[in-house]
Image: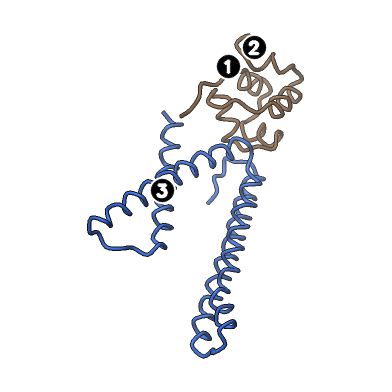
Chain colours: A blue, B brown
Amino acid sequence: MFRRCDTPAMRRNGWRYLAEMAAGLAICIALTKLSRLYLPGLSDEMLRQAVAISPMLGILFVAVAIVRSIRRLDEYQRGRILGISAAAGGVTVLIAFAYGLLETAGLPHRNMMWIWPVMAVAWAACALGDLWLRKR
Amino acid sequence: VVAQAVKNRVRELRTARAWTQVELAEELGVSRQTIHAIESERYDPSLPLAMTIAKLFGKRVEAIFGDDA
């Protein structure tokens, strides 16, 4: 999966990232299912909130996996990731503001969770743009 | 925007030792992409990395990087 032409250390880093990310997502999915299962039967408000927010533990694992993977990158790769992330953040902000203004003209109101897929697509597009710029 | 990088002799020094980009990357603890970017003069390494490269090849930094290299 990771390109055979890179160094063993870089390939190891890639696999480590995937393992940590998969663990985080698995925790998140498991806690979400448990939360959905037990939440309807709980009456105590504090306990309900604690159970409802419990999948965030998995999200925290995912965030740690991302930070750890970036820390393992070398200076050139970090620079590229920073550039791509900054561009993707900018594109997402532009899209979010543009849609927010269009809502005032009658477009349907969207849940704020829509921002994540928008950001993911923007990140992928910026990564492809970065690749194209470097291959020119 | 991809900035114009300074000239360097990394490819020349590497091939003179019959090393692959992967071997040089391993020696320096960086990715092969980074070596490729430096050799194609699309990326200027940081001073610490440039000094590590110079030390590995047994040369001064200015003998590897810069217009006079």
Residue under disc 1 on the same chain as residue under disc 2? yes
Q: Nearer the viewer, residue A104 or B12?
A: A104
Could you tell me which secondary element the residue under label 3 belongs to?
Answer: helix
For image coordinates 49% across by 81% down, the residue present is A36
Q: Quadrant of residue B47?
A: top right
Q: Nearer the viewer, residue A40 or B48?
A: A40
Q: Nearer the viewer, residue B55 or A83?
A: A83
Residue under disc 2 on the same chain as residue under disc 3? no
Mark 1 sits on what residue?
Answer: B7
Q: Quadrant of residue B23?
A: top right
Rounded to the nearest angstrom, the CA distance separating label 2 from label 3 is 44 Å
Q: Position of residue A44 (x, y in %)?
A: 57, 87
The chain holding disc 1 is: B
What amino acid is labelled 2 in the image? Ala
The chain holding disc 3 is: A
Mark 2 sits on what residue?
Answer: B69
Q: Position of residue A16 (x, y in %)?
A: 63, 55
What amino acid is labelled 3 in the image? Val
Mark 3 sits on what residue?
Answer: A93
For label 3, count other residues whose C-alpha is less than 10 Å away and answer few (under 14), some (14-19) or many (20+).
some
Q: Residue furthest left?
A: A106
Q: Quadrant of residue B49?
A: top right
Q: Are marks 2 and 3 in contact (CB under 8 Å)?
A: no
Eyeballing the image, is A57 above or below A123? Answer: below
Q: Residue furthest front?
A: A104
Rounded to the nearest angstrom, the CA distance separating label 1 from label 3 is 38 Å
Could you tell me which secondary element the residue under label 1 belongs to?
Answer: loop
What amino acid is labelled 1 in the image? Lys
Q: Are marks 1 and 2 in contact (CB under 8 Å)?
A: yes
Rounded to the nearest angstrom, the CA distance separating label 1 from label 2 is 8 Å
